[in-house]
Image (cartoon, rainbow, N blue to C red):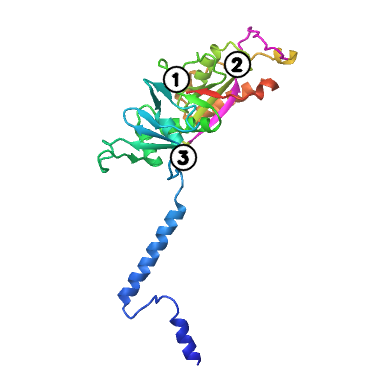
Amino acid sequence: MAARRQRKLLGFGPRWQSADPTESLTRAHEVEQALQNLKEVCQQQKVQRHGQAECAAELGEAIRLTRRRGQAVESFGRREDGQWLLELEEALYLAERGSLEAQALEAEASSEPAGKRRRLSVPELYRRVAEDPQLDLDAYLVYSHLRRSGYRVTRPAEGPVKSWDLGGCPAKVHVVRPDECVLASLRAAGATASTSLEEPLGVAVAMCAKGSPCFLELARPLLPGDPGDPEPGCSAEEAAAPAVAPPAPPPEEEAHLAPSARYAAMLQRVASLAEAGVPGRAAGKASMDAWL
């Protein structure tokens, strides 16, 4: 009776083994392959929805918006000749959020039938950013961080790369790299400043060595001898805030310093500016615009 029950238990379910050893090995390999495929699907990073996005763009010589719904792209792109155009960093950022479906033109999607377009994945858009001569991954890290922080980020107008004449922009964001003369850049910014501490200056440093940007906020310096005009409702203490001298001239050997030494020198200079104090009312202001 016990032997009969054991035979029934062994016969329950699929037979994993048979008399043919080759068939058993093949079956085991199929099971292992199926488990591996399921593991890869579970561990795959979900960075883009596969459903229909709110907007769609066509990538060619220019990135042209072909479908637009909702407010997803309200602060992105520009209108030119009746078309809404996006920059490459804007297309990648919107695609990462799942708000934009980026499509390749027919010439680039040669494997598709005529008249069809291929949807580009986020890794493919990252590859385009890395190959773009006017953009790189470090610059996109700065851009995406500022966007996620609530800033509206646009490319600078035609002219010098570093321009501090930004009109009514309430916040200036200076994007530098560790291999630049950071102190010289800050000194040049302070030499042209003519406003009070109420106007902040953001410094974005792309840390190439660590692979992520570091952002520092400091007050825009007030030139000595320039009293500045206090805003209506400004208290006497805020109006009498001490002026902050522009950064001291950097040493001549700054150009020969290692990137880590330059970054440390910039941190020291930012700390000295922060010790001067920022009016409490201005510290709570939200800066909603940034210029790269």
Considering the numbered disc 3 on the image, is that residue within a helix, a strand or a loop?
Answer: loop
- Residue type for callout 1: Pro
Mark-to-mark CA distance, 2 and 1: 23 Å
- Rendered position, 229 above or below 212: above
Q: Is residue 229 magenta?
A: yes
- Rendered position, 21 above or below 168: below
Residue beneath label 3, please?
A: 98
Mark-to-mark CA distance, 2 and 3: 40 Å
Indicate which disc, 2 or 3, sits on the residue closer to the N terminus.
3
Which numbered tag is attached to residue 156? 1
Tell me what residue is drawn at x 63 percent, y 9 percent.
Answer: 224
Neighbour tally class for label 3: few under 14, some 14-19, many 20 plus, Cα within 10 Å: many
- Residue type for callout 3: Gly
Considering the numbered disc 1 on the image, is that residue within a helix, a strand or a loop?
Answer: loop
Neighbour tally class for label 1: few under 14, some 14-19, many 20 plus, Cα within 10 Å: few
Residue 104 spot, x, y in % from top left = 32, 37
Decide whether the magenta segment is chiefly helix, strand or loop.
Answer: loop
| Magenta segment boundaries in residue numbering | 212-234
Tell me what residue is drawn at x 74 percent, y 15 percent.
Answer: 237
Residue beneath label 2, please?
A: 221
Residue 45 spot, x, y in % from top left = 46, 48
Tell me what residue is drawn at x 57 percent, y 28 percent.
Answer: 216
Indicate which disc, 3 or 1, sits on the residue closer to the N terminus.
3
